[in-house]
Amino acid sequence: MNYTELGTFSPMSFSSNNCRRRCKSFKKNFDTSFLHAIWAGIAGYFISLSFLYPKNRKALRLLGILIPAVLHGMYDSFGWSLIGLFISYLGAVLLIVYLQRAKDFQNKLLP
């Protein structure tokens, strides 16, 4: 184990490759925290609807699990490409649309 693996400062820790790796790691950790919150919000939205509308409980819970799981899997597959960026924006837009159209969705679920 060398000094850079321990997280201490050494002349090697200031190399350009190491700096790029650390910056990319910080950005990825920072971004994925918000993406996980967005995906959890989507899951929570559909799971909470499943408690309000027991007739559609299974379908709503399935959506609450599948939509974030598919977005998460696609983001993990495409990562830092433009497709990964599009998927992260898609998740945020979906959550915003779901929250803005909550009344419309609830009216459609009523018998």
Image (tube, rainbow, N blue to C red):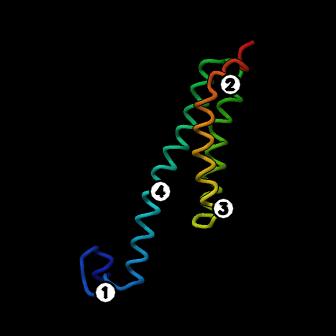
Label 2: how many Cα within 10 Å (few below 14, some 14–19, many 20+): few
Task: Please state the horizontal and vertical placement of residue 75, each as a whole percent of the image.
Answer: 61, 57
**Residue at which label 1 appears:** 12
**Residue at which label 4 appears:** 31
Label 4: how many Cα within 10 Å (few below 14, some 14–19, many 20+): few
Answer left or right for 6 relative to 74: left
Task: Please state the horizontal and vertical placement of residue 42, each as a whole percent of the image.
Answer: 58, 38
Q: Residue furthest top?
A: 111
Residue in view at x 67 percent, y 42 percent: 66
Label 1: how many Cα within 10 Å (few below 14, some 14–19, many 20+): few
Report if the CB atoms under discs 1 and 3 are less than 8 Å apart: no
Residue in view at x 69 percent, y 17 percent: 107
Q: Which is in the foreground here, disc 4 or disc 1?
A: 4
Which amino acid is tagged 2?
Phe
Q: Quadrant of residue 108?
A: top right
Distance of label 1 from label 2 (alpha carbons) = 56 Å
**Residue at which label 3 appears:** 83
Which amino acid is tagged 1?
Met
Distance of label 4 from label 3 (alpha carbons) = 15 Å
Location of residue 92 with respect to 57 vertically, above or below = below
Label 3: how many Cα within 10 Å (few below 14, some 14–19, many 20+): some
Answer left or right for 73 relative to 37: right
Q: Earlier in the sequence, mark 4 or mark 2?
A: 4
Report if the CB atoms under discs 1 and 2 are less than 8 Å apart: no
**Residue at which label 2 appears:** 105
Q: Earlier in the sequence, mark 4 or mark 3?
A: 4
Q: Split into 4 quadrants, where in the image is the C terminus?
A: top right
